[in-house]
Amino acid sequence: MPIPKLRRDKNHLYTIEEYLKIDRASQERYEYYDGEIRLMAGESGNHGDISVNISSELRFQLKGKNCRVRSKDSKIQTGGLNLDTKSKKGVFSYPDIVVICGKVEYHDKVQDIVLNPKVIIEVLSDSTEVYDRNNKFTRYKLFNPTLTDYILVSQDKPQVEHFIRQDDGGWKVFFYLGLDQSFTIEYIECTLNLVEIYDRIEFPKEAFEFIEEVRNG
């Protein structure tokens, strides 16, 4: 099968097979959601700094353990482990940060699509926040059974939302607001301090005013 061309018709839906050929042949990164192919936007300076800060902290704490951290160029499959590549249903995404524990399981022999993420972290952007919070997270919860932690990190204020899978299959969320806060990802035994996550990030004064308002009720 030759490499398909991206169509200008935004309503056109692609099969998984078509998407994989397009994405693997491109120097750009594309995500896939139920037949739609979406070009990944470039990152802001703050987004890049925050992502590197988190990756560095996790890399240091995971040294010698049976888990590894990978950055935004690692692709994750969601939608069942045996997807029909002729289908137009499924999700392929590029999380900002992913932690994988044990042996890495791959979609196929190309070994560029991971099936067993343990922790996924997204640094929120205006263009992707709604998708990260809703459709993408819903699919992760339903079709990524290895996933134990999903973490959303804001850019405009020092705020982290940590979603943790419970024993009954439900999810509980914890909020952390302010540079003096920290939280632990229990499964991988890593603790992240917000002051380290946001190292070199300059927030507008409104961010700190918001924190004071929240803390003072």
Image (cartoon, rainbow, N blue to C red):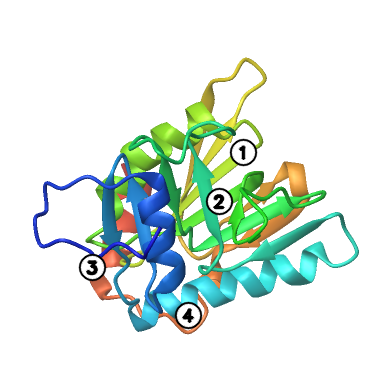
Q: Left or right? Give the position of 173 relative to 23.
A: right
**Which residue does the numbered mark 4 point to in the structure image?**
49
Nearest to viewer (mark 3 / mark 1): 1
Q: Amino acid at mark 3?
A: Glu
What residue is rendered at 28% in x and 55% in y? Answer: 37
Q: Secondary structure at mark 4?
A: helix
Q: How many circles with numbers are drawn on the protein?
A: 4
Q: Quadrant of the C terminus?
A: top left
- Marks 3 & 2, CB-CB < 8 Å contact: no
Q: Amino acid at mark 2?
A: Ile
Nearest to viewer (mark 1 / mark 4): 1
**Which residue does the numbered mark 2 point to in the structure image?**
120
- Where 173 falls versus 33 (above or below)? above
**Which residue does the numbered mark 1 point to in the structure image?**
147
- Marks 1 & 2, CB-CB < 8 Å contact: yes
Nearest to viewer (mark 3 / mark 4): 4
Q: Residues within 10 Å of mark 4 (few under 14, many from 20)?
A: some
Q: Secondary structure at mark 1?
A: loop
Cα gap from disc 2 to disc 4, whole angstroms: 17 Å
Q: Left or right? Give the position of 175 relative to 166.
A: left
* Outermost residue, top side: 168
